[in-house]
């Protein structure tokens, strides 16, 4: 049976993949790397993104839902705080929302899943191991 596309489910899956990829990249960079990556959850932001749906009911739902969102500038400020706060790179947290660490889904922390995502991404992009980040973690 073919599943119907769900924009909310797809969005949730992309957020999971962001954290999974972030964790895997940090593993591949190794603990001695001067580079540390984090994933940022922008939260519910009051934008027009929900108007992209072709379904009238989806557009109507988004017009109601977005009212509970924050201004884009506030969401951006939380992300910018991660870039400019030097203490973020010393913390073990991977996922942040409005400059506050969140506990990611345990699935996103499983090394086997991160390794598989990396393999699929490398194959799809044609980059392979050319990026210099081998599967042997430092």
Image (spheres, rainbow, N blue to C red):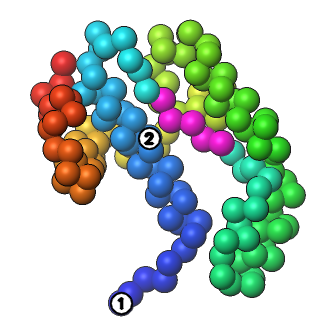
Number of marks in picture: 2
Q: Would you say the magenta stretch is mainly helix, strand or loop?
A: strand
Q: Nearer the viewer, residue 96 or 53?
A: 53
Is 47 situated left or right of 102 in this image?
A: right
Q: Is residue 74 above or below residue 88?
A: below
Q: Nearer the viewer, residue 125 or 15?
A: 125
For numbered disc 1, what is the local secondary structure?
A: loop
Which residue does the image show at 58% across and 21% down from the upper left? 83
- Reading the image, the residue beneath label 2 is 19
Q: Is residue 112 above or below residue 57?
A: above
Is 17 situated left or right of 113 in this image?
A: right
Which residue does the image show at 31% across and 13% down from the upper left? 33
- Which quadrant, please, contains the C terminus? top left
Give percent across and percent down for residue 51. 73, 71
Q: In the picture, residue 49 is in which quadrant?
A: bottom right
Q: Is residue 47 above or below residue 92?
A: below
> Disc number at residue 1?
1
Alpha carbon distance from label 1 to label 2: 30 Å
Q: Which residues are magenta?
A: 38-42
> Disc number at residue 16?
none
Is 57 situated left or right of 15 in this image?
A: right
Give percent across and percent down for residue 6. 54, 74
Q: Earlier in the sequence, mark 1 or mark 2?
A: 1
Q: Nearer the viewer, residue 131 or 134?
A: 131
């Amino acid at each position: 049976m073919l599943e119907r596309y769900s924009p909310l489910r797809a969005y949730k899956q992309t957020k999971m993949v962001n954290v999974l990829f972030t964790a895997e990249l940090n593993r591949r960079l190794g603990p001695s790397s001067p580079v540390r990556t984090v994933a940022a959850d922008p939260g519910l932001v009051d934008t027009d993104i929900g108007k992209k749906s072709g379904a009238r009911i989806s557009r109507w739902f988004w017009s109601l839902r977005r009212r509970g969102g924050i201004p884009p500038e506030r969401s951006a400020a939380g992300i910018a705080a991660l870039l400019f706060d030097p203490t973020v790179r010393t913390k073990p947290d991977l996922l942040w929302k409005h400059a506050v660490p969140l506990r990611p889904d345990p699935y996103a922390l499983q090394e086997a899943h991160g390794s598989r995502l990396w393999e699929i991404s490398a194959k799809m992009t044609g980059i392979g191991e050319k990026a210099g980040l081998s599967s042997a973690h430092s």
